[in-house]
Amino acid sequence: MNINREQAIELLHEYVKTEHIITHSYAVEAVMRALAKKLAPEDVELWGIAGLLHDLDEDVCGWREDMSKHGPMTVDILKERGLGNQQLYDAILAHNPENGKKASNQFETALYAADPMSGFINAIALGHTDKKLASVKVKSIVKRMKETRFAAGANREAMWSIEHVGVEFTEFAELALESMNEISEVLGL
Ligand SMILES: [Fe+2]
């Protein structure tokens, strides 16, 4: 791959100024690295970079007016700079099916599922009095999945889709929580 983690972080800070999107990007990176260790150990860097860059265009693409722009614009930015490869572009596109690309392999599905999972765990942590990831239990992640009004923006279908690529939901919740816990200071949780 022609982009490394440092370059991805530099790009992230160049394009994204909204603090919570930056921390979200680090959270998705952590979950993606954990998933890669299980599903594609040779691609840990690539999967992590996809997590870091998947929302690169969030501040600049005008998705509030047109959801289909979120994803393709990131791919344009990367291509302009000669960074990334088709696998990375496809995963970034597929995390937002509104642009027409559906997740169709392990890597794409992992990003599609990791994105809402990180936000979902974040929301559960904020529900605790101490607002700490350390207070979040895997059991409550599983339980709250059924409470459709809780963190309604976290796409349940996307999170469940991890089971299509051979990871049981409970294991997914466990590794996502653990990986976010490891960077709790970065996430401020
Ligand atoms: Fe995201």
Image (tube, helix red, strand yellow):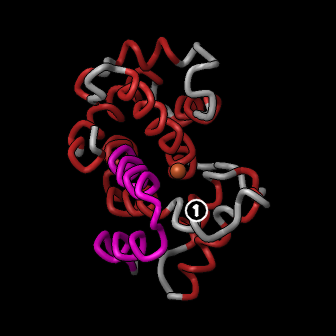
Q: Is residue 86 left or right of residue 119?
A: right
Judge: label 1 CB < 8 Å from ligand 1. Answer: yes
- Residue 111 locus on image (x, y percent): 51, 48
Vertical placement of 180 versus 6: above or below? above
- Residue 72 locus on image (x, y percent): 67, 69
Looking at the rendered structure, the kind of residue marked 1 is Glu
Q: Is residue 173 left or right of residue 183?
A: right
Most prominent secondary structure in the magenta stretch?
helix
Dot 1 alpha-carbon crowd within 10 angstroms: few under 14, some 14 to 19, many 20 or more: many
Q: Is residue 22 visible?
A: yes
| Magenta region | 3-32
Quick one: which residue is furthest to the front in this view? 129
Q: Residue at x 31, y 21 (%)?
A: 136
Which corner quadrant holds the N terminus? bottom left
Of residues 138 and 188, which is closer to you in this image? Answer: 188
- Give the total number of marks visible in the rendering: 1
Which corner quadrant holds the C terminus? top left
Vertical placement of 139 versus 26: above or below? above
Q: Is residue 40 visible?
A: no
Q: Residue at x 37, y 47 (%)?
A: 27
Disc 1, SS: loop
- Residue 88 locus on image (x, y percent): 52, 66
Q: Residue at x 70, y 66 (%)?
A: 62
Q: Residue at x 52, y 60 (%)?
A: 54
Vertical placement of 99 versus 183: above or below? below
Of residues 57 and 104, which is closer to you in this image? Answer: 57
Q: Which residue is mark 1?
A: 58
